[in-house]
Amino acid sequence: MAADNQGNKKRTTLLLGGLVALMFGFGFAMVPLYDLLCQVTGTQSIAIRAGMGKGPAVTGEIDKSRLITIKFDATVNPNLPWDFGPEIRTMKVHPGEIYAVNFVASNRSNSSVTGQAIPSVAPWQATPYFSKLECFCFTRQTLKGNERTDMPLRFMVSPDLPAEIRSLTLSYSFMRLKPGQEAENETQTLPAIAAIN
Amino acid sequence: MTTTTMTHDEAHHHDAPTGWRRWLFSTNHKDIGTLYLLFALTMMFLGGASAMLIRMELFQPGIQLLDPDLYNNLVTNHALIMIFGAVMPAAAGLANWMIPMMIGAPDMALPRLNNLSFWILPAAATMLLLSFVVPFFPGGGTQINTGWTLYPPLSVQVGMSMDFLIFAIHLLGISSVLASINIIVTLLNMRAPGMNLMKMPMFCWTWLVTAFLLILVVPVLAGGVTMLLFDRHFGTSFFDAAGGGDPVLFQHLFWFFGHPEVYVLLLPSIGVLSHVIPTFSRKPLFGYNSMVGAMLAVATIGMVVWAHHQYTVGMSLGAVTYFMIGTILISIPVGLMIFNFIATMWRGSMTFETPMLFAVAIVLMFTFGGLSGVMLAVVPADMQYHDSMFVVAHFHYVLMPGAVFGLFAGVFYWLPKWTGHMYDERLGKIFFWTNVIGFNITFFPQHFLGLAGMPRRIVDYNVMFTEFNVLSSIGAMIFGLSHLLLLYIVIKTIRGGQKAKSRSWEGATGLEWELSSPPPFHSWTVAPQIK
Ligand code: HEM
Ligand SMILES: [Cu+2]
């Protein structure tokens, strides 16, 4: 019993070890697969399926009967040595009217750094009804060492915004761009991106 | 059957080390089983202490004892310690002790691996405790305020304590994967001649399935927390939307592990029940084949319903419908198991020793928890219940009876076999009643709190929730303190008591009862023949 059993044990052990390695790999394979799955099935995009992605037209008509509260939120990724935030935290707006608000960014470091702001709207159902006519997030932004600058945003909330949404949050997250992605005139090498906690 | 085989066990003793070396270098399944059980008991008191602090804070509205971050750190620790430190090692301890004896083997298949998988645990526990201690020191960073689910972006922002925790999770994962490999290899290769898979004792079956589940899902969790570590330190953006990643991906990876994990906690106890209920009903288990089938069905469907924990993240209607139907489907095989237990008791000549009392309590209370689970599985309802105290009540009603009481039943059932002494039945019953009553006072009111809108994982609450919280905290004191009695009973039984017969319970069947109590050093040196 002992001899052939020993071989069996070894085989089973190796098979199971292989299965463990496979599942560890599966976890990482989820990263591209997940994106693919979401694109193919639209799993996370009720908005697209419901045909909400068309975006509002600027009709010029203003809905004076409604006041929507807009909250501004700003985050800076730890890899970017900037301070960044809106000049005002909240605003009440009429759908259909165009408003402007300033964000202020300042570079805490001595060297010139390029970043990119990524916007998002919460609740996500409101996303297609919030249009940015002018935004610093459309392009990458470069600040020289210790430079401080205003970043303007002009926006409008569509009158088609569903009635149950009375307040929404516009959130910006500023990321540092990798050296390869920087604007042409940047020549000096940047330190490797490292998140500091 | 083969009583002659255990007379010469002393012959094998000569090379066995003694003193602390006996434990550190042990490759003996019983010694390692004992180590696992003692470790689990210690961790249960640690996890219990954090729960007591949580309930003391929630005794009154307002913030009395704990900072919000400290409170949430205790919530995190409580869950991780109980799941990875108490329930899983206790179940592994039972497996180590019982599997070789039940299948007629001398020991586990891979004894050195067995030693390793246990001794990783104290190291992991140390890491976990360090993650809690480090923020108290200057420069130690912030506390882990994420809850056991460790969702980013919050978990990316936590200080270095999170790195300790991630390392602890890696170690715990390695330990349980190694233990699982060992158990599967043992079960597949070391069964006594004539014991085919469909004659294997139920407890072994439940562990076979549990071990496979662990092997399939623990590596995925390990991958997930590794990505978290990379996002924290190496500039990757797996979970950072602004860098092209997606925080929801972490939730998928976590729950791909997390949902099967609840069956990992549940199944070994179902296995224990499948022995306890027939023994004290003096009838064979009703529907062995359907039991095995139901368990396989639970495990299979259980692998593909994880996103019922994420209904609120904005998945498409198709996806949530799929996850809802899948989740509700699971209650069919789970129900089948419960009906098998009831049918086993039906017209049996039942007696109610402590293990049986726990078994009956499990059948009643676990079913109740399953019912609140079906409520949570319904998408529109869960939009309200999600992240409320109702969820807390649900999972304590499934986990406490489903996992912990099952382990208690197993410990009382097999203590005479392990120690050679009967435990004090009167004390056992007192423990049962204080424990079960304390449990219900603690967690029943939390259903109402959740339905009324009290969120979980928040240090403070609205004054309108005060009464039920006071009740719950009082229950928690009774419940928590009752475990001291368990400790006393266990120590008392180890040190002495009425001698246990080989077949300690009159209605018990199975190979483990053919061995003496306590059993010889090597369980079955000559394999018994199964007819
Ligand atoms: C009929 C069977 C069950 C169903 C339909 C069910 C359903 C659910 C659902 C839908 C949730 C998510 C609730 C939410 O967060 O909004 C949940 C949470 C949970 N369930 Fe169950 N469940 C069942 C059985 C079990 C069992 C057997 C266990 C463990 C032994 C368990 C442990 C848990 C845990 C630990 C959580 C909370 C996890 C967390 O958020 O921290 N459930 N259950
Ligand atoms: Cu689940």
Image (cartoon, coloured by chain):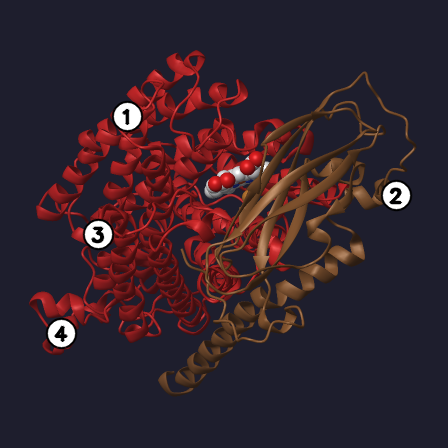
Between disc 3 and disc 1, the foreground one is 1
Q: Which mark is residue B37?
A: none
Instruction: Using the numbered discs, state the Cα–Cα distance from disc 3 to disc 1 in whole angstroms.
Output: 27 Å
Q: Are marks 2 and 4 in contact (CB under 8 Å)?
A: no
Between disc 1 and disc 4, the foreground one is 1
Between disc 2 and disc 4, the foreground one is 2
Instruction: Using the numbered discs, state the Cα–Cα distance from disc 1 to disc 2 in whole angstroms.
Output: 53 Å
Which residue appears at 38% of the width and 12% of the height?
A: B467
User: In this structure image, what is the colour of chain A?
Assistant: brown
* Label 4 CB sits under 8 Å from any ligand 1 atom: no
Q: Are marks 3 and 4 in contact (CB under 8 Å)?
A: no
Q: Give the percent coordinates (x, y) of residue A188.
A: 54, 75
Q: Which residue is mark 4?
A: B16
- The chain letter of the red chain reads B
Q: Secondary structure at mark 3?
A: helix
Say whether residue B107 is visible.
no
Q: Which mark is residue B38?
A: 3
Residue flagged by tag 1: what amino acid is it?
Met
Residue flagged by tag 3: what amino acid is it?
Leu
Q: Which of the marked residues, 3 or 1, is nearer the chain's N terminus?
A: 3
Compared to residue B13, the image places residue B285 above or below, namely above
* Label 1 CB sits under 8 Å from any ligand 1 atom: no
Output the chain of dot 1: B
Output the chain of dot 2: A
Q: Give the percent coordinates (x, y) of residue B304.
A: 64, 52
Residue flagged by tag 4: what amino acid is it?
Ala
Q: Which of the marked residues, 1 or 4, is nearer the chain's N terminus?
A: 4
Q: Which residue is mark 2?
A: A54
Q: Are marks 3 and 4 on the same chain?
A: yes
B361 vs B126, nearest the viewer: B126
Which residue appears at 13% of the width and 48% of the height?
A: B494
